[in-house]
Image (cartoon, helix red, strand yellow):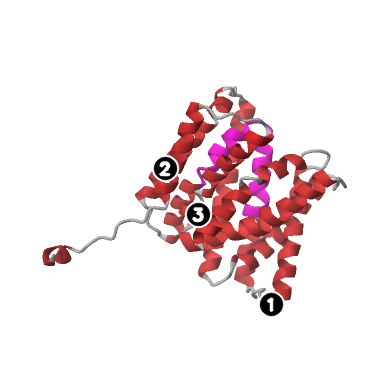
Amino acid sequence: MNLSLYLLTVLIWGTTWIAIKFQMGEVAVAASIAYRFALASAVLFAMLWFSGRLQPLDRRGQGICLVQGLCLFCLNFLCFYTASQWIPSGLIAVIFSTATLWNAINARLLFKQRIAPNVLLGGGLGLSGLGLLFWPELAGHEASRESLLGIGLALLGTLFFSAGNMLSSLQQKAGLKPLTTNAWGMLYGALMLVMICLVSGTPFAFEWNARYVGSLLYLAIPGSVIGFTAYLTLVGRMGPERAAYCTVLFPVVALNISVFVEGYQWTAPALFGLVLVMLGNVLVFRKPRAVVPAAELVRR
């Protein structure tokens, strides 16, 4: 079950970049994100209501959903979309992949979970592999004040993403399912994005064409309803640090799709980077050996 959820998350989030690219146009970024999560929230609430699986939330649960919505379905996306104006997408992918390490550190600080050495080593290998995959893009980028701002925003977006992971883990420890908490979190995230648009004077334009509407539906339903539910379920089952290795793998899926869509060509360094990413994946999910007590060794 965990493997199916993991592969589903990687495949969905590895293809959402195409839909996000189709969203770029007349509609402001904040408005597009608000539409995405408002629609995703409506779908989740309708599904849970008709199936009788909507869990009741007390004041504490609602408060955590509010903060989760702010971190995971609002500020996280605003940071990354804004950063993409100043730094290459490859650099954003590399920075976002550090979520594996941030989740391990935050789980240690907040939940006293032991940081497994293989997770840190695997995350480091994956990060190095992504660096090689996107090296031509990174090497050709000139440093500037805007670049530093973009890097800072991408890192801040990663930290917001990690914080949302921790909050989801906390909710699941309290017995709340990701379907219910995501429905509320996406609703709160959409409402806060609407408020940001109103305060900043951002117009609520809309493109009534197949390209925009189709990409919006893909981002809202597979990309958000299915993708975030599968991913946050993994956070609860596998731990935030292992689940976050998805952030290393979905750029690899995106590059493979780019071979057919945009004519991307694999190079020797990129293939070596792919090998490092796969080795990192093996390390992250390798189960630690059980420690055999000394008395047991003596009996043997």
Q: Which residue is mark 3?
A: 243
Number of other residues with Cα within 10 Å of mark 1, as a class: few under 14, some 14 to 19, many 20 or more: few
Residue 180, visible in the rendered structure? yes
Instruction: Identify the residue under disc 2.
Output: 279
Q: CA distance from mark 2 to mark 3?
A: 16 Å
Q: Residue 171: x percent and y percent?
A: 55, 66
Residue 235 visible to an observer of this rendering: no
Q: Secondary structure at mark 3?
A: helix
Q: Which residue is mark 1?
A: 52
* Residue occupying the far left of the picture: 298
Whichever of callouts 1 and 3 sits on the residue coming sooner in the sequence is: 1
| Residue name at image x 51 percent, y 51 percent | 244
Numbered disc in front, either 2 or 3: 2
- In this rendering, would 228 be left or right of 120? right
Q: Residue at point 76% right, 63% down?
A: 42
Q: Which residues are magenta?
A: 71-99
C-alpha separation, residue under disc 1 versus residue under disc 3: 28 Å
For the residues carrying marks 2 and 1, which lies nearer the camera in this image?
2
Query: Image height check: is 2 above or below 198?
Result: below
Question: Secondary structure beneath disc 2?
Answer: helix
